[in-house]
Image (cartoon, rainbow, N blue to C red):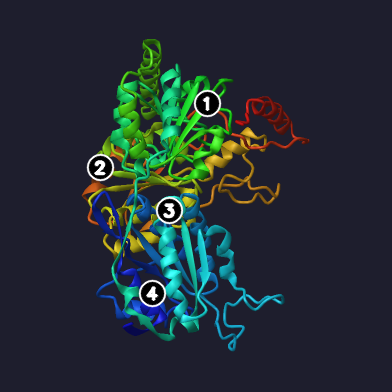
Amino acid sequence: MKSRKLTMGQAIVQFLTQQYVERDGEETAFFAGMFGIFGHGNVAGIGQALHQYSDSFRFFQTRNEQSMVHTAAAYAKMSNRLSTIACTSSIGPGATNMLTAAAGATINRLPVLLFPGDIFSTRLVAPVLQQLESPNSQDISVNDCFKPISRYWDRINRPEQIITALPEAMRVLTSQVDTGTVTLALPQDVQAEAYPYPEQLFEKRVYTIGRPRPDTKLLNTAIEWISKSKKPIIIAGGGVIYSDATEHLAKLVEKTGIPVGETFAGKGSLNYDHPNNLGSIGATGTPGANILAREADLVIAIGTRLSDFTTASKTAFQNPDVRFININIAEFDAAKHSALPLVADAQVTLTELIDALENYKVDRNYTDRISIFKEEWEEEVERLYRINHHPLPAQSEVIGVVNDFSRPEDVVVCAAGSLPGDLHKLWRTRNPKQFHLEYGYSCMGYEIAGGLGIKMADPTRDVYVLVGDGSYLMLAQEIITSIQEDYKLIIVLINNNGHSSIGGLSRATGAEGFATRFRYRDPDSGELHGDFLPVDLAANAKSLGANVIETTTVQSLKSALQEARDAETTTVVTIDVDYDVGVPQYESWWDVPVAEVSDVDSAKEAYEEYIVAKQKERYFL
């Protein structure tokens, strides 16, 4: 057997360059490169290898380990999970900085490959700088924290161990069911050790992303259920988009007349103006989607995890005879709500349903109700887009301006605060990839890093990062990376001097918005009731190298967006909005527990309302 003597770091980089995936006859390199920040835990191993092979494998310098994993996850999502970017860090804080984003990638079922540096495998030099010591075991480091949030985890204590570890990592990363974070902890001494690796390890490998069919018997049962249904509704999740099944969904609903409600990940499954698209569903849903979900006798969930926002904390479906059909590539998700599980690819399954439901159509009364709900919702969106609030505009007006200005091929990205819920309701999606929300983890700070990943995956699209001041202050540094790599972002920075989403939730639960505004501490009361903090967000963005345009009105925002589109570099457009003006909830609820006992009247009142609302929660057995 021929071999090649390489360091383990060199062997890893050479292996990554030869990994490909194929779906529907189209082949794609699985790794577009590697992000990293170097320290003593990886500079002489992976770092040396990346330098040696810099002409064949792209390295991207980044500013924060958490943000580079966010960027890799966003890249993977934009690529329908057919490509990603690996990430390397030093040991200690560099490694643990990746934990938050690693959890997000696993929760959102997005492939990311992490190479955190680790302590010496020989244990001779110990404790090294940044090493966690344990009196119970010497086989432990901070990288053990990745175990519960990784879909595959390994510590590579000998250079030859990657011969079996790397193929296992690829098995998980390319799995439509098991994908998420893969962590290979690399002791810093082993990274630099040489070994005669077999040449076969570096041969090109192509992983086929299949389209499994549903079980025939279960599919026939599903067809029977749908054929007998009087009030069916479809919940379109992210799996519709990942499967490239949006056109198939459109054909099915046009043939049958079944209405569709979209999850956060599934928004864009149908264009907003499709007659059967009732918009968002669940806790941040539209009236039509939530009313029809409440009445539905059959719920067809496609490619969704059925999270609490989608099910309105299991209050959304109130028909006592409701049944569920779950079309999902993952058996775990397909079985939720005691559903009829069609464990299969969404595109293939929809194709078979289209052929089988030749003679099924919902009745005229149901179709008329769908049309009325659709028309009424578009009127409500128009009202919120043009509410004309003074002296500060409402956040919904800002969303309206950006939506009206952006093109169908452009992308809006967001993750946390009050913006995601407002966007879920109000954004008029005109392209399956136009709406990019990280809401499985709803991680503050994802927005700018995520926007960078989207732009890297498809540089032809303009990317609009909508971010509130709270999230911006968490993680804005990748503005620098976007400028360094010439990936222009348009960042709309919306300031309301606080955490308005949690402020509203705090008031709803009786805590009166406690500690959700960015104010000085009052020296007399000892509370955070003083003047607003003098944070200059525009100056901060300028200091990171961005082109900055400050706006104060909706009209000036429109002009600024044109200027930002014409600019050659990342541009931050700032605008202040009214903290207290939000978008209503519609026919929905979200379970956030309220204090059962309290001395505060507002908390007492909130608890009384809570116990009434909670009675609608249901088990589906």
Residue lying at the far front of the rendered structure = 217
From the viewer's perspective, is the residue at label 3 or at label 2 nearer?
Answer: 3
Position in image of residue 609 (x %, y %): 67, 26
What residue do we see at 71% from left, 31% from top?
Answer: 607
Please name the residue shown 38% across and 42% down the image: 345
Disc on the earlier residue, 3 or 4:
4
- Dot 3 or dot 1: first in sequence order is 3
- Disc nearer the start of the sequence (3/2): 3
Amino acid type of disc 1? Arg
> Which label is found at residue 12?
4
Q: Amino acid at mark 4?
A: Ile
Q: Mark 2, mark 4: which one is toward the viewer?
A: 4
* Distance from Cα at disc 3 to Cα at disc 2: 22 Å
Residue on which disc 1 sits: 323
**Could you tell me if the residues under marks 3 and 2 are in contact, i.e. CB atoms within 8 Å?**
no
Q: CA distance from mark 2 to mark 1?
A: 37 Å
* Relative to 387, 508 lies left or right: right
Other residues around mark 4 within 10 Å, as few (<14) / some (14–19) / many (≥20):
many
Q: Disc 2 marks which residue?
A: 409
Closer-to-camera residue (560/51):
51
| For the residues bearing labels 2 and 4, Cβ distance under 8 angstroms | no
Viewer-closest of 386 and 318: 318
